[in-house]
């Protein structure tokens, strides 16, 4: 009997109308859409469908430019056929950018050495048609103060002050290693790019919310360093909207090279 073929998928999606990546009962999710498309492409019965494993779970409303996933195919289909076939079965808001045969032990999640997210801020008066993909945070933000706050995020820290999880879903450890956190200017957008070995739930959105509060003068730039030193210290907690966040890239090289 022929062994299944492990297939790597490189994906992009508009997460606005989905309840996140992870499959959920009675909810429309990215994972469930792709699993259904894979099942149809390989003509599998619903109970026979192999799971599609993603490199990470994006929340409701969060987008991706560089998500990675894998599944085990029961038969061999050329990569170009997999990509074209899945795209013909998926909505336009989910695209397979590439499909490749991977090593039998490749794991999209466990082999990932790090991830990069980008959060898009609109800094001027903008059309409401753009708010599907960015947060209109307004003009007058102090980039200097925000960059000072962002610099404190780099390194290995306890990020409890920057995440939230339902009871029973807390991570084994809140400590994460952030490789870089920098702002990129692109026209009337200010983009925070942050790379780390891994992220906690809502971590990037809470980072951005706090940085915008700093940019507006609501918090001092050293507030982030204080939150990292004392995660349980009282004080306001900010969280940016989901629309501005994108999973930009999943890294499979050594940590620190992201």
Image (cartoon, rainbow, N blue to C red):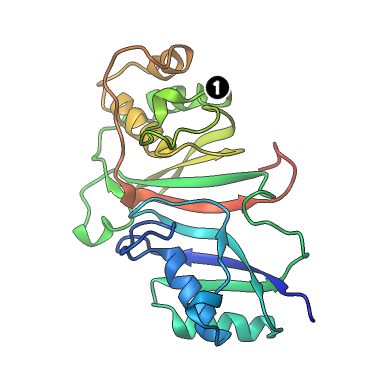
Query: Image quadrant for the C terminus?
Result: top right
**Residue 152 seen by the camera:** yes
Given residues 182 and 231, the one toward you in this image is 231
Identify the residue at image location x=38%, y=23%: 145
**Which residue is pictured at 51% across the width and 35% down the height?**
182
Q: Looking at the figure, which quarter contains the N terminus?
A: bottom right
The part of the image, by quadrant, that contains residue 50 is bottom right
Residue 97 percent coordinates (x, y): 56, 72
Residue 217: x, y in percent? 26, 22
**7 and 186: which is toward the camera:** 7
Is 56 placed above or below 77 here? above
Could you classify mark 1 by the number of other residues whose Cα lies within 10 Å: few (under 14), some (14-19), or many (20 or more)?
some
114 w.r.t. 79: above or below: above
Q: Which residue is mark 1?
A: 157
Q: Is residue 166 left or right of residue 6?
A: left
Question: Who's the residue at 46% across and 64% down the image?
Answer: 31
Judged left or right of residue 185, residue 79 is: right
Q: Please tell me in which quadrant of the rendered image residue 127 appears.
A: bottom left
Q: Nearer the viewer, residue 197 or 22?
A: 22
Locate residue 84: give its quadrant.
Answer: bottom right
């Amino acid at each position: 009997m022929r062994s299944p073929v492990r297939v790597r998928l490189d994906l992009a999606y508009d997460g606005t109308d989905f309840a996140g990546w992870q499959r959920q009962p009675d909810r429309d999710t990215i994972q469930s859409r792709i699993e259904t498309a894979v099942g149809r492409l390989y003509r599998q019965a619903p109970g026979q469908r192999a799971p599609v494993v993603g490199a990470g779970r994006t929340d409701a409303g969060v987008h991706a430019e560089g998500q990675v996933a894998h599944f085990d195919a029961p038969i061999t289909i050329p990569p170009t056929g997999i990509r074209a076939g899945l795209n013909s079965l998926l909505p336009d808001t989910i695209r397979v950018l590439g499909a490749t045969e991977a090593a039998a032990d490749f794991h999209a999640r466990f082999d990932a050495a790090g991830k990069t997210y980008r959060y898009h801020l609109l800094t001027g008066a903008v059309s409401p048609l753009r708010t599907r993909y960015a947060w209109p945070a307004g003009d007058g933000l102090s980039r200097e103060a925000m960059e000072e706050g962002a610099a404190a995020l780099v390194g290995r820290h306890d990020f409890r002050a920057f995440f939230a999880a339902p009871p029973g879903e807390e991570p084994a450890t809140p400590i994460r290693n952030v490789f870089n956190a920098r702002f990129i200017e692109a026209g009337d957008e200010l983009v925070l790019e942050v790379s780390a070995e891994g992220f906690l739930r809502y971590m990037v959105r809470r980072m951005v919310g706090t940085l915008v509060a700093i940019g507006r003068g609501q918090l001092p730039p050293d507030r982030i360093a204080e939150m990292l030193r004392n995660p349980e210290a009282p004080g306001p907690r900010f969280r940016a909207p989901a629309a501005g966040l994108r999973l930009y890239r999943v890294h499979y090289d050594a940590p620190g090279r992201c």
